[in-house]
Image (cartoon, helix red, strand yellow):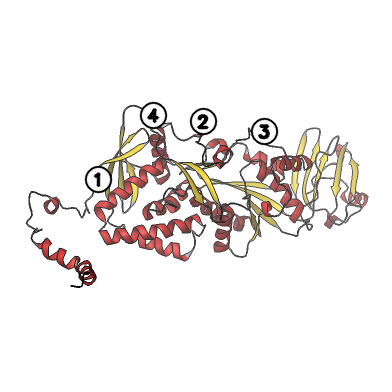
């Protein structure tokens, strides 16, 4: 006997019928049963009311079929294995059709899936972006997402786009936030949010959702990107709406809704990893007086334990952007991965800082950016050959604003885009190579060359001076110092 249990879209009653195995067949409306008119009558609904997904199973044989609207049905030879009301009715907080959720597979995003369905009566499409966080982060995600109640999982490899279109422009601009932070998380959020908007269009979603807390910067970065690229999308931020206040609440909610709780060891740190960096926050780091523990670091070796012999690396640069390592041309993502490995081995790129969050509070974070630190050093050094003083000063002043815009989530702001056009123009001649020495946490420049160099040995040398006449300096100094001389004359009554 096969048992069919359904929840009608027009009724809250659970109805069961028993159908002999021999009478099962695939009918014209894509649901498996025999004598369908009699079955509809026994269920107490019209044929048009039985719509949705059905899984018919009889002693190990399973058939999944799909209808367009209404309900979900599961049949089993012995018992009903899964029953839930279809996402066509209004939820506790309103009604949405389909939501694309930024999904990691962790506890928070796993419970967001049933919470969205319960509160907004919607289908949930989980989206995961591969921005270089590591293969281990992506394993088993589809199974986790569907076990949580998602209708599908979409995974996109964004590594090349992330480095080419987001990291490299910031590198070219020299964007560093508050003297230290190389913007690893700040650059990753807009590329992820952009992909979510694209997926929402592909699957016909009318909303997007994220798992960012209401105290951090990431909520702003996601949502400003959504606003800029598709202002018609609804945005759901569960952490600003629900009553879940911590890990134990989330576990309880998961159990209540039959969501498998991820059986991973809870890290004492809050981490974010991508191809550019790894950030650490929380636990003992919340007290700025505490030194980070060595076992916290994951991308870099302790400088004390780094090799005793220095390593030299040469970075090839064209128009302000890196293109090669030690003479080998690489794609943007491959180049960065290569330098992460080299730099990490020598303890390069550890930063410990207290920063000002966009939402007003200060926070302490520790960042590992081995490859990025090498690249920033190389590009900036090459500019010392190719940019004149006034250009360099203007570029450096704009870089501060550029970094602030990126940190604040305004990647798609016309101001940043206009500044980017400026940076692209003035670095057209920043082409050449820089050789660096890596040793126990330090990066030292040992040579720099450029076919567009403004440095002229025949002018700068103390040994010769056909172009530069030292006698000309006297007149220059008198004119350059005239304002200071006039002020001194006034003060002395001369």
Label 4 secondary element? loop
> Along the horizontal axis of the image, is 277 left or right of 398?
right
Q: Which residue does the numbered mark 4 point to in the structure image?
A: 306
Q: Position of residue 142 (x, y in %)?
A: 64, 41
The image quarter containing residue 475 is: bottom left
Instruction: Point out the tag, 2 or 3, that comes first from the N-terminus.
Output: 3
**Residue in view at x 34 percent, y 45 percent:** 377
**Residue in view at x 8 percent, y 54 percent:** 465
Label 1 secondary element? strand
Q: Which residue does the numbered mark 1 point to in the structure image?
A: 448
Residue placed most toward the observer, 290 or 239: 290
Mark 1 or 2: in front is: 2
Residue placed most toward the observer, 176 or 226: 176
**Residue in view at x 14 percent, y 52 percent:** 460
Q: In the rendered image, which quarter contains the C terminus?
A: bottom left
Q: Which residue does the numbered mark 2 point to in the structure image?
A: 295
Mark 3 or 4: in front is: 4
Q: Are marks 1 and 4 in contact (CB under 8 Å)?
A: no
Residue placed most toward the observer, 213 or 359: 359
Instruction: Point out the tag, 3 or 4, that comes first from the N-terminus.
Output: 3
Mark 1 or 4: in front is: 4
- Whether residue 67 is visible here, answered yes or no, is no
- Whether residue 322 is visible here, answered yes or no, is yes
**Separation of disc 1 and disc 2 at Cα?**
36 Å
Instruction: Point out the tag, 2 or 4, that comes first from the N-terminus.
Output: 2
Q: Which residue does the numbered mark 3 point to in the structure image?
A: 263
């Amino acid at each position: 006997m096969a048992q069919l249990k359904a929840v009608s879209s027009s009724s809250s009653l659970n109805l069961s019928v028993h159908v002999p195995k021999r009478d099962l067949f695939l009918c014209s409306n894509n649901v498996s049963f025999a004598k369908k008119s009699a079955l509809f009558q026994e269920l107490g609904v019209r044929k048009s009311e039985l719509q949705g997904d059905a899984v018919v199973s009889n002693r190990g044989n399973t058939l999944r079929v799909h209808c367009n609207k209404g309900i979900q049905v599961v049949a089993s030879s012995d018992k009903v294995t899964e029953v839930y009301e279809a996402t066509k009715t209004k939820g506790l907080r309103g009604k949405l059709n389909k939501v694309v959720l930024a999904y990691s597979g962790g506890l928070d995003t796993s419970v967001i899936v049933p919470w969205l369905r319960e509160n907004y009566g919607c289908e949930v499409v989980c989206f995961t972006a591969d921005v270089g966080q590591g293969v281990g982060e992506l394993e088993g995600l589809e199974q986790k997402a569907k076990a949580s109640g998602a209708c599908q999982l979409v995974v996109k490899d964004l590594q090349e786009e992330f480095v080419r279109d987001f990291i490299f422009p910031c590198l070219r601009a020299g964007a560093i936030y508050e003297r230290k932070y190389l913007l690893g998380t700040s650059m990753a959020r807009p590329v992820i949010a952009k992909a979510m908007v694209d997926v929402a269009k592909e699957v016909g979603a009318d909303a997007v959702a994220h798992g960012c807390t209401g105290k951090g910067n990431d909520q702003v970065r996601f949502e400003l990107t959504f606003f800029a690229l598709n202002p018609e999308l609804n945005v759901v931020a569960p952490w600003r709406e629900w009553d879940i206040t911590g890990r134990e609440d989330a576990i309880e909610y998961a159990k209540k809704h039959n969501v498998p709780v991820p059986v991973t060891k809870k890290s004492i740190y809050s981490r974010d990893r991508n191809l550019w960096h790894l950030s650490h926050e929380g636990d003992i780091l919340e007290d700025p007086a505490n030194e980070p523990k060595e076992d916290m670091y994951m991308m870099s070796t302790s400088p004390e334990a780094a090799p005793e012999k220095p390593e030299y690396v040469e970075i090839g640069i064209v128009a302000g952007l890196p293109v090669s390592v030690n003479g080998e041309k690489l794609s943007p993502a491959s180049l960065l991965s290569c330098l992460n490995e080299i730099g990490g081995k020598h303890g390069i790129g550890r930063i410990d800082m207290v920063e000002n969050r966009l939402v007003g509070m200060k926070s302490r974070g520790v960042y590992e950016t081995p490859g990025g630190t090498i690249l920033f050093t190389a590009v900036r050094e090459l500019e010392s050959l190719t940019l004149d003083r006034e250009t360099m000063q203007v570029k450096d002043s704009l870089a501060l604003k550029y970094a602030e815009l990126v940190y604040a989530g305004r990647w798609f702001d016309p101001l940043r885009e206009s500044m980017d056009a400026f940076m692209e123009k003035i670095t057209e001649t920043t082409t050449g190579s820089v050789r660096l020495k890596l040793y126990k946490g330090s990066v030292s420049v040992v040579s720099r060359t450029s076919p567009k160099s403004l440095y002229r040995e025949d002018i700068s040398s103390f040994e010769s001076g056909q172009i530069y006449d030292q006698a000309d300096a006297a007149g220059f100094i008198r004119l350059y110092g005239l304002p200071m001389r006039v002020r001194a004359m006034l003060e002395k009554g001369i």
